[in-house]
């Protein structure tokens, strides 16, 4: 169906800006910059409850990483903290109030200057 139009998708904006593939399949930016490089970043870590039925979510944004690197970091955070999470609009969303744990983990990875 080469001429069909997309009606509905759940992928959101999790597409690579370079190749157009979904971020978990994209390999074009994975070698562009390693996670631990010392570049100017101003990551924001905040707690959100609004619009989530009263449940708390820790949102990490403005990391300055590529899509593939964000997915790798998300997998690391989820594994180390034993919690769920997702990538939405170039921001990591971690279930629960995990601000201190995420801040410590980002500092140990060299992403956050503490």
Image (cartoon, rainbow, N blue to C red):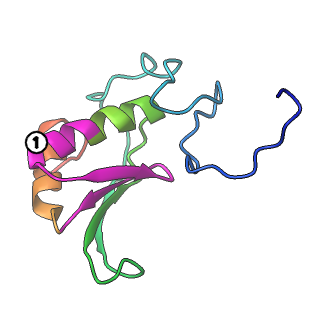
Q: Position of residue 53 (x, y in %)?
A: 34, 82
Q: Which residue is mark 1?
A: 80
Residue at left offset 84%, top offset 37%? 4
Residue at left offset 37%, top offset 77%? 52
Residue 30: image quadrant is top left
Residue at left offset 31%, top offset 32%? 72
Judged from this view, the residue extending furthest toward the front is 1
Depicted 89 relative to depicted 65: above or below: below
Residue at left offset 25%, top offset 37%? 75
Nearer to me, 10 or 35: 10
Total marks placed: 1
Q: Is 22 displayed left or right of 71 in the figure?
A: right
Judged from this view, the residue extending furthest toward the right is 3
Residue 64: image quadrant is top left
Q: Position of residue 28 (x, y in %)?
A: 53, 18
Q: Residues within 10 Å of mark 1 (few under 14, many from 20)?
A: few
Q: Position of residue 18 (x, y in %)?
A: 64, 27
| Residue interval drawn in magenta | 75-96
Q: Is 82 displayed left or right of 68 in the figure?
A: left
> Split into 4 quadrants, where in the image is the N terminus?
top right
Residue 73: image quadrant is top left
């Amino acid at each position: 169906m080469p001429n069909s139009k997309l009606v509905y998708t759940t992928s959101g904006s999790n597409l690579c800006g370079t190749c157009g593939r979904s971020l978990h399949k994209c390999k074009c930016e994975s070698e562009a910059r390693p996670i631990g490089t010392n570049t100017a970043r101003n990551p924001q870590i905040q707690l959100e409850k609004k619009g989530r039925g009263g449940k708390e979510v820790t949102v990490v944004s403005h990391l300055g990483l590529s899509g593939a690197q964000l997915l790798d970091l998300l997998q690391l955070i989820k594994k180390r903290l034993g919690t769920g999470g997702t990538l939405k609009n170039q921001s990591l969303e971690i279930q629960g109030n995990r601000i201190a744990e995420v801040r410590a983990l980002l500092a140990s990875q060299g992403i956050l200057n503490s």
